[in-house]
Image (tube, rainbow, N blue to C red):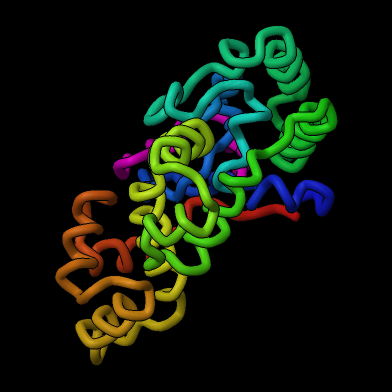
Amino acid sequence: MAEDLNDRLSLAWVVDTDVAHDLVPDACVDVVWLPDGSVRVCGPEVEGWTFLPLDGPEPVGIRFRPGHAAPVVGTAMDEIRDQRVMVEDLLGADGRRLVEELGELPEIAPPERRIAVLENHIRRWISEGHNVDPLAEHVATTLTDDPGRRVDGLRRELDVSERQLLRRCTVAFGYGPATLRRILRLQRFLALAGGTHTDESPGRGIASLAAQAGYADQQHLSREARAIARATPSELLAERWTSDPSTTRA
């Protein structure tokens, strides 16, 4: 991924698997090119869903960091929550230009060329002065680093009303700070789990990871994993260790 976009984007990706993959909500928003030639903005999710493989060239996408997509795509995130929206429906002529430019590439073009086109358009949209809400950026950073942080304490730190915090988070993330905290906490568990699994003691491993991620106990983690990802913690980790459908391209 282009270094100058690191502040706004978390990664660029290419789907390189031919099997279905279960996706866990991560508070991010993706702009995705699909083999049928369409470009879709994938809104923030509150429940896990399954990405099915498609015939044709590899789908590619770029992923906005939490809270960074709304000013660029020009809509509140709650308007597209749990939806995959055609980019031209959100950005009009700008979206159509992106679709047309990607459509001009030959089918055999390497994925990096499509990613470069996506990044160039994102770069131009950002340059037009679409600023991220500093409150949303602070909330995302704080809850990423400390997903066990109480929302009341965060509100007092920011010196805003409960109503204002909810409103601005809903615009930026698609939901309020409590839901954001739950999603980021589950992502923290998955991040901590990377490379820590041992077949000899999976139970103890999960309990320890749950505590490190900010859960009250393993049962708390299990309830949240089922509610958000529709899977048990063990199932999530098995999926993580055995299947990674995307690769980042620098």
Task: Report the label total.
Answer: 0
- Name above or below for residue 197 compared with residue 6: below
The percent coordinates of residue 163 (x first, y second) are: 40, 36
Q: Is residue 34 left or right of residue 23?
A: right
- Name above or below for residue 175 compared with residue 218: above
Q: Is residue 79 left or right of residue 99?
A: left
Residue at 69 percent across and 26 percent down: it is: 107
The residue lying furthest to the top in this view is 93
Residue 61, magenta (yes or no): yes
The percent coordinates of residue 162 (x first, y second) are: 39, 43
Boundaries of the magenta span = 44-64
Q: Quadrant of residue 72?
A: top right
Q: Quadrant of residue 134?
A: top right
Residue at 50 percent across and 36 percent down: it is: 168
Residue 89, magenta (yes or no): no
- Name above or below for residue 66 compared with residue 60: below
Q: Nearer the viewer, residue 248 or 65?
A: 65
